[in-house]
Image (cartoon, helix red, strand yellow):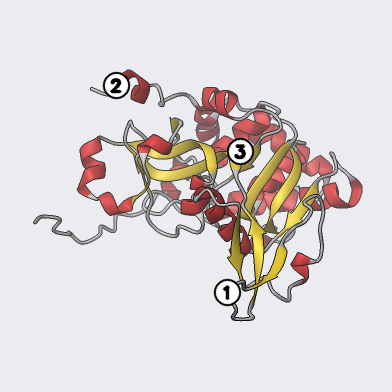
Amino acid sequence: MAEPEVAGKLMPLAEAVKKLIPDGCRLRSGGIAVRKPFAVIYEVMRQRKRDLTFLMSGWTEDADWLIGAGCVDKLEGSYLGLEALGLAHCYRRAIEKGVPRRVLIEEYSNFGMTMRFMAAGMGLPFMPVKSQLGSDLLKVESFRHPKAQVLEDPFGSGEKVALLPACPADVALLHAQRCDADGNAQVWGQLGDDLWGTYAGKKVLLTVEEVVPTRVIRHDPNRTIVPGFRVDAIVATPFGGHPYQVQGYYDTDRAFRRDYAARSTTREGWESWADEWVYGVEGHEEYLKKLGEERLARLRAKPVMSGKVNYGY
C-alpha cells in the first residue's frame, strides 16, 4: 500500500491548479506539438489566474488561450502561432492593441530555450551556446537585462560563446502517457524539451492518461523520464492533451483546432469559443462529455504494440 505522502499526490485537477499555481508564478508548459497539458490550461483559465510568466520553447493554442483569458503578463520562449492553421490571434491582439491586456515577450530560439531549461535543471546560472551568435535575437531585449552575454573562451581558443541565463520555473507542467501513484512518469514518442523543461520546475504538476501499478512502470524503466520524488501533484486526465495527440492513446482533433483557428480571428469569436469550451463546462469530465463518446472513439489510437525486450541478467 502506498505511503500517505505518496497517495497524497493524487488529487482532482481543480485542487492541483489551486494548490500549485498561484498568481504571478513562472509557469512552464510542456509538449511541442504533442502531449500538451491542455486540461491544466483550461483549468488555469477557469480559476482566473493572473500575472503569469509563461515559459516554453514553442507555444501554440496553450499560450493563445491564456493570453485571451488575460492570465499572462510575460512570455519567455520562441515561436507562438497555430502552426499550419495560421496566426495566434489573441497573441496578436495583445501585442498590437493591448486586448485584453498587454503582454511582454522575451524571445530566444527553440534550442536556446532548451539550453536555458537545461541550465535551470542542472542548478547552473547560465548555459554557453554557439547557435545564438550572429542572431538579432540577442540584440532585441524586452524585460530581461541583459538578455545574454557574449564572451571569449577564457581557456585561450579565441572562440566566442553566448551565455544564456537559466530559465527556472516555479511550476512545470507535464502531460505523460502514464505514471504510478508515486509519480514515476513514462513518456514515449516525441520528447521535445520535456525532460529539461520539467526539471527546470521547482514544483511539477503531472497529468497522465492513466495511473498504473508500479510493476508496470518497472517492467519498462527506460520510458521513465521523471522520477516520482520530483513530482508534487498527479492528476489522472484521460484525453488531457486534447485537441493534440498523445501517442498510443489518441490522434489530433483537427476539426477542433480548425474551429478554434476560425473563431479566434475576432475577439467576439474567441469569447464565444471560450464560453462554450472553457467557462461553460465545470471541469475536465464535463468537457469530455461535451466532446462526446463518438468523437473520442474516432480519435482513439489503434493498438500497435512494441516488440518485447529481455531485461534479465
Which tag, 1 or 3, sits closer to the chain's start?
3
Circle 1 sits on which residue? Answer: 155
Identify residue type, mark 3. Answer: Ile
- On screen, residue 37 versus residue 1, left or right, reads right
Judge depth for marks 1 and 2 and give the one in front: 1
Identify residue type, mark 1. Answer: Phe
User: Disc 1 on helix, strand or loop?
Assistant: loop
Q: Vertical placement of 90 versus 231: above or below?
A: below
**How many numbered circles are shown?**
3
Q: Vertical placement of 136 versus 312: above or below?
A: below
How far apart are the two marked residues, 1 and 3, measured between alpha carbons? 46 Å
Q: Are marks 2 and 3 in contact (CB under 8 Å)?
A: no
Q: Residue furthest right?
A: 97
Say the numbered circle drawn on residue 41.
3
- Percent across and percent down for residue 160 are 66, 75
User: Disc 2 on helix, strand or loop?
Assistant: loop
- Percent across and percent down for residue 23 are 70, 29
Q: Residue furthest left?
A: 313
Which tag, 2 or 3, sits closer to the chain's start?
2
Q: Residues within 10 Å of mark 1 (few under 14, many from 20)?
A: few
Which tag, 1 or 2, sits closer to the chain's start?
2
Q: Vertical placement of 113 versus 178: above or below?
A: below
Q: Residue furthest top?
A: 4
**Nearer the observer, 186 or 140:** 140
Q: Residues within 10 Å of mark 3 (few under 14, many from 20)?
A: many
**Nearer the observer, 113 or 73:** 113
Q: Are marks 1 and 3 in contact (CB under 8 Å)?
A: no
In what quadrant of the picture does the C terminus appear? bottom left
- Percent across and percent down for residue 306 are 25, 59
User: Disc 3 on helix, strand or loop?
Assistant: helix
